[in-house]
Image (cartoon, helix red, strand yellow):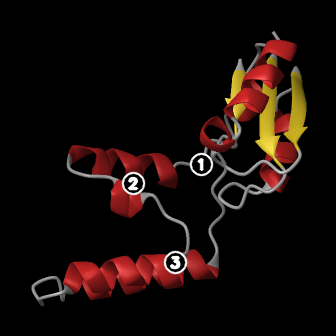
């Protein structure tokens, strides 16, 4: 199995809880003109990187469920050989998560891609493909 920048560990932080509450309060004002523009600005400049605004329709609910689920307790039950591939410049899923996943999955190997970000399949597809081929 290959895990590429797998966002499976969720840490509750004060910042995340604060931003969640703020977004719920601001949702009350959704009837105001230009709300969507202000909301996009809030996500871009206050929250930072987020795919939430690009998700539409039914996928929005699925997205919220996926990003809120913490799978860290299930990692130790993975029994198949696993290669974990991570970019050392990943800002969406910190590299510390890669080391923790590697530690929790007993039969795993960690491969770090220097200069790689979270979107390895988009920004460095050749390097990612080669790392996968090297570990088959």
Quick one: SS at disc 3?
Answer: helix
Q: In which quadrant of the rendered image does the C terminus lie? A: top right
Q: What is the number of the mark on residue 47?
A: 3
Please tell me which residue is depicted at 76% across the width and 57% down the height of the picture. 94
**From the viewer's perspective, is residue 78 above or below residue 118?**
above
Q: Choose the circle earlier in sequence order: 1 or 2.
A: 2
Left or right for 37, reference 42 = left
At label 1, counting other C-alpha atoms closer than 10 Å, the crowd grade (few under 14, some 14-19, many 20 or more) is some
- From the viewer's perspective, is the residue at label 1 or at label 2 nearer? 2
Q: Residue 94's mark?
A: none
The disc placed on residue 64 is 2
Disc sitting over residue 70 in the figure: 1
Residue 134 in percent (x, y) is at 87, 15
For this orientation, the residue located farthest to the top is 136
Mark 3–mark 2 distance (CA, rounded to whole Å): 15 Å
Q: Which residue is nearer to you in this view: 127 or 15? A: 127
Calculate the distance from the C-alpha at mark 1 to the C-alpha at mark 2: 12 Å
User: Dividing the image into 4 quarters, which one contains the N terminus?
Assistant: top right
Q: Residue at x 80, y 57 (%)?
A: 89
Classify mark 2: helix, strand or loop.
Answer: helix
Q: Give the spatial CA distance, label 3 vs label 1.
A: 20 Å
- Residue 109, given in percent of the width and then of the height, sits at 90, 26
In the rendered image, residue 127, in percent from the top left (x then y), is placed at 78, 31
């Amino acid at each position: 199995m290959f895990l590429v920048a797998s966002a499976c560990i969720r840490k509750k932080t004060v910042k995340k809880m604060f931003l969640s509450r703020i977004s719920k309060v601001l949702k009350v004002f959704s009837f105001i003109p230009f709300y969507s523009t202000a909301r996009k600005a809030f996500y871009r400049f206050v929250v930072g990187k987020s795919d939430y605004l690009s998700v539409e329709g039914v996928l929005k609910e699925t997205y919220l469920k996926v990003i809120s689920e913490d799978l860290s307790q299930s990692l130790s039950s993975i029994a198949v050989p696993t290669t974990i591939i991570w970019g050392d410049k990943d800002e969406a899923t910190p590299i510390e998560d890669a080391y923790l996943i590697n530690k929790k999955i007993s039969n795993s190997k960690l491969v770090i891609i220097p200069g790689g970000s979270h979107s390895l399949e988009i920004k460095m597809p050749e390097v990612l493909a080669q790392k996968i081929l090297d570990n088959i």
